[in-house]
Image (spheres, rainbow, N blue to C red):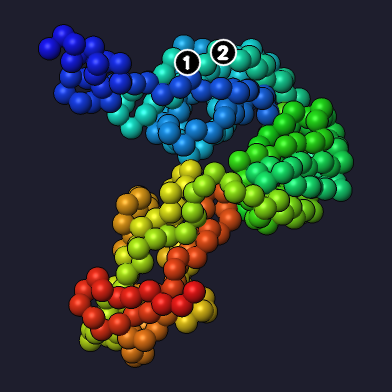
């Protein structure tokens, strides 16, 4: 028995088969005082992590879901020095050691500062290989001073840099994909500028990380109700870094509707009853695609031609 216990410990499992191996310590942790009352903390994304725990000194201040790699710690005191660290927690509850602490000092705020910075100008971008983009812009101006720039993609902030920088590298993108970026500026009072003009960047083609962004195993069961016909759909969400909460449904090659989960999006099997009015269900071709966590749309599922075969036997059709 002793030999068995040693072998289990070496594989990161307890004697009852539970996972006991902690995730790796978060790396590339940085802290940017983006205003007088907030600090922007970032780290390298890791899809194997369920939750990132963010600490201010010895106190945990935030839990961040594993699909994200940044967060604003707010409610801070102007003109104060802080230290931040991050540790990782996996689905089994194992917790890593904390990353080394990184310092950040919030700037003092000028009383009555209410004027936002001007929008950053002349935003330009170019692909940085198959999974990144380099952005540059002209500095914004402010009556007191800019403290940070925020980079946005599809309405989501994906990066922040200090005020003395007018360039940023965005990583973790997908090959051969079109991205649209904008940049905004912030001052010490957390006044935000208008967005810059957008810039479009198309990443280079490449193999990527080998993941398919298309939903799989799309199935449809025809159903007739008193208020019309339905196609009861199921599919498996794509395996991506984060949760897919929005899908588009196409009927016979044309966009039909968007399916949005506001809370608890499905992670194993998605289900949706597609209303078709008085149209017959059998014979139509359906396909779906999901909006990925980075805001872009993933690949389409395989086409599915709906038949009146027994449940679960609808057959794929078309290329």
Residue extending farthest left: 1
Q: Which element carries disc 1, helix, strand or loop?
A: loop
Closest to the observer: 236 or 89? 236
Residue extending farthest top: 2
Residue displayed at 45% across by 22% down = 24
* Residue 112 can be seen, yes or no: no
Residue displayed at 21% across by 74% down = 311
Q: Is residue 9 left or right of residue 177?
A: left
Mark 1 packing: few (<14 Cα in 10 Å), some, or many (20+)? some
Q: Position of residue 23 (x, y in %)?
A: 41, 24
* Residue 249 can be seen, yes or no: yes
Q: Is residue 58 left or right of residue 44?
A: left
Q: CA distance from mark 1 to mark 2?
A: 8 Å
Residue displayed at 46% across by 11% down = 58
Q: Is residue 147 above or below residue 10?
A: below
- Asked if the residue at tag 2 contacts the one at tag 1, i.e. Cβ–Cβ closer than 8 Å, the answer is yes
Residue marked by disc 1 = 98
Q: Is residue 121 above or below residue 256?
A: above
Residue marked by disc 2 = 101
């Amino acid at each position: 028995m002793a030999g068995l216990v040693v072998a289990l410990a070496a594989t990161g499992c307890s004697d009852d088969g539970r996972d006991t191996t902690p995730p790796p310590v978060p790396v590339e942790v940085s802290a940017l005082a983006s205003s007088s009352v907030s600090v922007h903390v970032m780290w390298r994304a890791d899809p194997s992590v369920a939750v990132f725990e963010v600490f201010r000194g010895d106190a945990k201040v935030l839990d961040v879901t594993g699909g994200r790699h940044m967060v604003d710690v707010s409610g801070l005191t102007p003109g104060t020095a802080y230290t931040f660290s991050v540790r990782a927690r996996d689905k089994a509850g194992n917790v890593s050691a904390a990353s080394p602490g990184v310092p950040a000092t919030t700037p003092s705020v000028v009383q009555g500062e209410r004027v936002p910075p001007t929008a950053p100008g002349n935003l330009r971008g170019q692909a940085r290989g198959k999974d990144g983009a380099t952005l540059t812009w002209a500095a914004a101006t402010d009556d007191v001073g800019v403290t940070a720039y925020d980079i946005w993609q599809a309405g989501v902030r994906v990066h922040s840099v200090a005020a003395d920088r007018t360039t940023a590298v965005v990583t973790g993108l997908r090959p051969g994909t079109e991205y649209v970026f904008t940049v905004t500026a912030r001052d010490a009072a957390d006044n935000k500028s208008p967005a810059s003009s957008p810039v479009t960047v198309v990443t280079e083609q490449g193999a990527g990380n080998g993941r398919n962004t298309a939903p799989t195993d799309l199935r449809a069961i025809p159903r007739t109700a008193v208020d019309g016909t339905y196609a009861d759909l199921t599919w498996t969400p794509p395996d991506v870094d984060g949760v897919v909460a929005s899908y588009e449904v196409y009927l016979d090659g044309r966009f039909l509707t968007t399916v949005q989960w506001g809370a608890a999006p499905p992670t194993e099997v998605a289900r949706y009853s597609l209303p078709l009015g008085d149209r017959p269900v059998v014979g139509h071709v359906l396909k779906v695609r999901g909006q990925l966590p980075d805001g872009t749309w993933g690949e389409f599922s395989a086409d599915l031609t709906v038949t009146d075969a027994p449940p679960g036997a609808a057959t794929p059709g078309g290329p």
